[in-house]
Amino acid sequence: MTEIAWDPRDAEILAGRIASQAADVRSLASTAKGAHLDSNCVGLMISPLVLPVAEIFMGVIDQVISFAGTSCDDLHSDLNKVNSGFQEMESTNISEVQRNAQLLNGDMR
């Protein structure tokens, strides 16, 4: 069976990178919300056909980008929780090992 090596420092670095990416996605989302198509951008003949579809598409893209930012935030939060839980468990395990070693050596009364 393969063991999983968990390094809290690496997890903290990864969580920081994910948080940074979440900020970038939120920035992209706010920029995308301001985007619109001018009525003359496609031409007089086809603009009535293209613009409504393009506006719907832009609305969907706004939602997708917003969801991606929220997902990054959630991942960042979950990774921090896992890392905290791991560190707490590791600290408890180390304390128990030290306590058991002391008991075996007869140091504790």
Image (cartoon, rainbow, N blue to C red):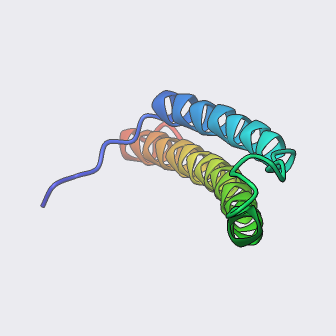
Using the rendered image of the protein, determine whether residue 109 is visible from the camera's viewpoint. no
Residue at position x 16%, y 55% in the image: 2
Tell me where residue 49 appears, x and y as whole percent.
70, 72
Q: Viewed as shown, does residue 49 lie left or right of 88?
A: right
Using the rendered image of the protein, determine whether residue 55 is visible from the camera's viewpoint. yes
In this rendering, the answer to whether 81 lies above or below 60 is above
Residue at position x 77%, y 71% in the image: 52
Q: Relative to the observer, which residue lies in front, 50 or 57?
A: 50
In this rendering, the answer to whether 20 lies above or below 37 is above
Q: Quadrant of residue 44?
A: bottom right
The quadrant of the rendering that contains the N terminus is bottom left
Q: Relative to the observer, which residue lies in front, 76 or 31?
A: 31
Tell me where residue 31 appears, x and y as whole percent.
80, 39
Q: Relative to the observer, which residue lies in front, 33 or 4?
A: 33
Tell me where residue 23 appears, x and y as whole percent.
74, 36
Residue at position x 73%, y 61% in the image: 47
Residue at position x 51%, y 27% in the image: 9
Q: Relative to the observer, which residue lies in front, 13 or 60?
A: 60
| Residue located farthest toward the right when viewing the structure as drawn | 34
In this rendering, the answer to whether 34 lies above or below 74 is above
Q: Viewed as shown, does residue 62 lie left or right of 108?
A: right
| Residue located farthest toward the front when viewing the structure as drawn | 45
